[in-house]
Image (tube, grey):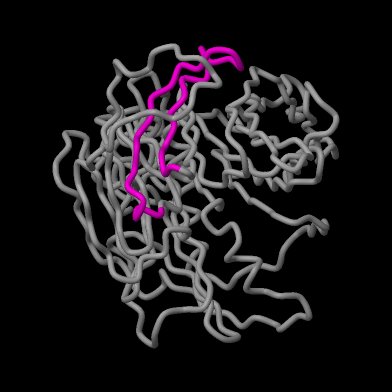
Amino acid sequence: MILADLDWKDVLNVRVTCKLLCTASRSRSVWRAQYQRVSDSYDTPLNAKDRTATYAELERDTLHWARLQHSWGSRPKPPTQRLLCECSAVQIHLVHGGRWLLASTDYPCLELYDLDSLNGRRRILIRSQDKHDEQVRTFVVDEVRMTPPNVDMFIALNHCEITDEPLMRISIWRITSGPDDHTLLAHHITSFNTYTTGVCVDMDLRGDYFATNGRSPNHIDIYDWRRSSSLVHHKATIALGQKNAVKSIRILSGQRILTFEWGVVRIYAVDASKFRPIPGRQPVVAPLTMPLHTLHLPGMDPYLLCPLHLDRLGTASLYLACAHAVVKLTVPYDDQPLIVADCLAYNEGRPWTWAITLHRAYFRKGTTATAVLLARGFDENCTQVWSIVDRNYDADSLMTTQVGSLSEQG
């Protein structure tokens, strides 16, 4: 028990200097305490380890996060590789285990780049399974728990026909890594028509549920995508007021939906009994839904959202960029009011561009960029500042178009 109270560096020193305590330094209880100490230092805790985790897994993850904290105070290293691609929209995902996925829409398919490919194959193409005259407009990723270096996640694609009145079609894909060389593989799961016109950019995917934000009238459709088809939809509908200009949505645990507008956050309840089969072409008919909670955050940008973190109880937390500071929003699992706490105040006015991840915030103003580690118990080394070389391309659009897509899983 004495080793559990020591720092992880001291535990490693004891292992190499004292043979009598070498076995004790590999105790599961010792490294569980070390991992919990590292997790407590973050404002958003790391993924909890279950009772089946071995000491080697606990030690590996503890040293991984310790190395990240140590390198945070050192000078940034130059990139080891560069990838240039011409595309209209780019989403960057840092998945569990430290692997980078760069996804871009290249009509009529979706390109996925694995920047940490182990065998040199870095790109896979996801094409429409049904029609050749469809375009991939938008997509959303649901990242699940993974064991490094294996990848296992779901992607929902928004297809639209090339017509005057395009009809939105949703396809669900599962992305996994090969058993031997960990090459990315795409598996088509299901597809169905929503029979809504236009392009929907407000989407979310979590578990068995897929949500879209529709217009005319304003509403949110939540699909049980595993049971839905083009003929029959298993879905629930939340009818919004005409003044509710929802820009982003998130699916919460406990049959709830989190919506973001300019300066306003709302939570809506979804009745589980409303997930009934209805004809796919049936028009939207639903009474006006009142929110459970409404929170006003002046200057909040509904597009600057970090990934949603859910603990075992279902309490959700994420960071938002407001007019005066970066704030942490906590959504209790038991339908209690929302909790807001300031994490990073702006000293010289609001930055020009932002990107927020689960544990870090990046912002730029002028030719200076700053990265901040959103954690507790650290000194001034938690902030890094560096200069940006002006390029001919529009650097602002690089961070503002898809800033909410940069995700980090602990």
| 11 horizontally vs 73: left or right | left
| 78 horizontally vs 301: left or right | right
Toward the left, the furthest residue is 336
Q: Is residue 291 above or below residue 392?
A: above
Q: Position of residue 70 (x, y in %)?
A: 47, 61
Q: Which quadrant: the C terminus?
A: top left
Is residue 178 inside the magenta stretch? no
Q: Can residue 359 be seen in this view?
A: yes
Number of marks: 0
In this rendered view, identify the residue nearer to me: 44 or 10: 44
Q: Which quadrant: the N terminus?
A: top left
Is residue 233 inside the magenta stretch? yes
Q: Where is residue 329 in the image (x, y as percent from the top left)?
A: 28, 54
Q: Quadrant of residue 12?
A: top left
| 243 horizontally vs 153: left or right | left
Which residue is at 58% across, 73% downward?
A: 75
Q: Position of residue 189 (x, y in %)?
A: 65, 17
In this rendered view, identify the residue nearer to me: 237 or 45: 237
| 52 horizontally vs 85: left or right | left
Which residue is at 34% across, 55% downward?
A: 243
Magenta range is: 217-245
Q: Is residue 45 above or below residue 124?
A: below
Q: Can residue 117 be seen in this view?
A: no
Q: Where is residue 19 in the image (x, y as percent from the top left)?
A: 41, 34
